[in-house]
Amino acid sequence: MASKKGVRITITVECTECRTNTNKRSNGVSRYTTSKNRRNTTGRLEIKKFCPHCNAHTVHKEIK
């Protein structure tokens, strides 16, 4: 019996500002894990979340 893959997958989103911003509060990159529906959201996910390193709400993009 073949196992059925679920529609929801777990993804990681990473802060886009941390890579280029030199005036950060602390070193590092903010990463969050979340899930997305593979059928409804086929492209890469972009969410605005709080980054503790930038100390602001920034855009977090899905990474591999």
Image (cartoon, rainbow, N blue to C red):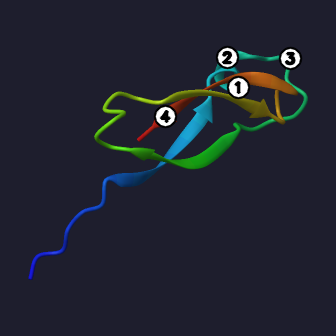
Q: Residue furthest left?
A: 1
Q: Give the foreground label among 1 and 4.
A: 4
Depth order, front residue of 1/14 = 1
Which residue is situated farthest in the bottom direction here? 1
Name the residue tied to disc 4.
Answer: 62
- Asked if marks 1 and 3 touch (Cβ < 8 Å), the reply is no
Q: CA distance from mark 2 to mark 3?
A: 9 Å
Camera-nearest label, 4 or 3 = 4
Mark linked to residue 20: 2
Which element type, helix, strand or loop, lies under badge 4? strand
The residue lying at 78 percent from left, 24 percent from top is: 57
* Residue contact between numbered discs 2 and 1, judged by CB atoms under 8 Å: yes
First reached walking from the N terminus: tag 4 or tag 2? 2
Q: Is residue 35 above or below residue 62?
A: below
Q: Earlier in the sequence, mark 4 or mark 3?
A: 3
Circle nearer the N terminus (1, 3): 1
Q: Are marks 4 and 2 in contact (CB under 8 Å)?
A: no
Amino acid type of the residue that numbered disc 2 sits on in the rendered structure? Thr
The amino acid type found where label 4 is placed reads Glu
Cα distance, mark 4 to mark 3? 23 Å
* Amino acid at dot 3: Asn
Q: Which residue is mark 1?
A: 18
